[in-house]
Image (cartoon, grey):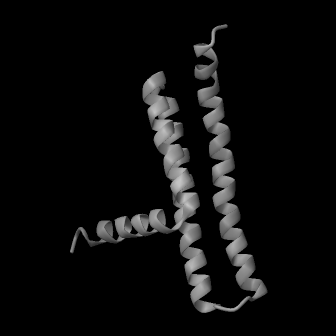
Amino acid sequence: MLLDPIKFALRGVKHTFQTEGNFRIMAVVFILAVAGGVAFGLTPTEWALVMVCSGITLGAELLNTAVEAVVDLVSPRYHARAAKAKDAACGASFMAAVFSSAVGLIIFVPYIRALFGP
């Protein structure tokens, strides 16, 4: 069916949300960023940056979860190459979060400072 890919995608997001603490944290940070964006009245460019960074970070965590699941399936016992694949996937998610956090600070810190005066 035409909507099956959407159903599968949402099932994957739901499963990851239910089972991965880091994904839940990232989702909460995304909600806070949206709330802050609404409260501060972000510019269209700032909104675009928040959305792109959020999408990349959440997407990277979804891919990390997928890689870990596949690696665990094909290599249930410890193997150095399996660990390397899992570590690299985790590193990708971490890097996305770090750089997205930096963008978030660049965008939101000036608005937060403005709340407390010059």
Q: Position of residue 78 (x, y in %)?
A: 73, 88
Quadrant position of residue 44 = top left
Residue 83 is left or right of residue 50, and the answer is: right
Residue for point 56% across, 83% down: 70
Quarter of the image with the N terminus is: bottom left
Q: Residue furthest right?
A: 80
Horizontal arrangement in the rendering, residue 30 relative to residue 88 (left or right): left
Location of residue 65 by image quarter: bottom right
Residue drawn at 53 percent across, 74 percent down? 66
- Residue 69 lies, in percent from the top left, at 56, 79
Considering the image in quadrants, where does the C terminus appear? top right
Left-right relation of 83 to 44: right
Please say whether residue 60 is visible from this viewpoint: no
Q: Residue at x 27, y 72 (%)?
A: 4
Q: Residue at 60% across / 22% down in the picture?
A: 112
In the displayed structure, 92 sits above or below 36; it is below
Residue 85 position within the rendered picture, expressed as x and y whole percent measured from the top left:
69, 77
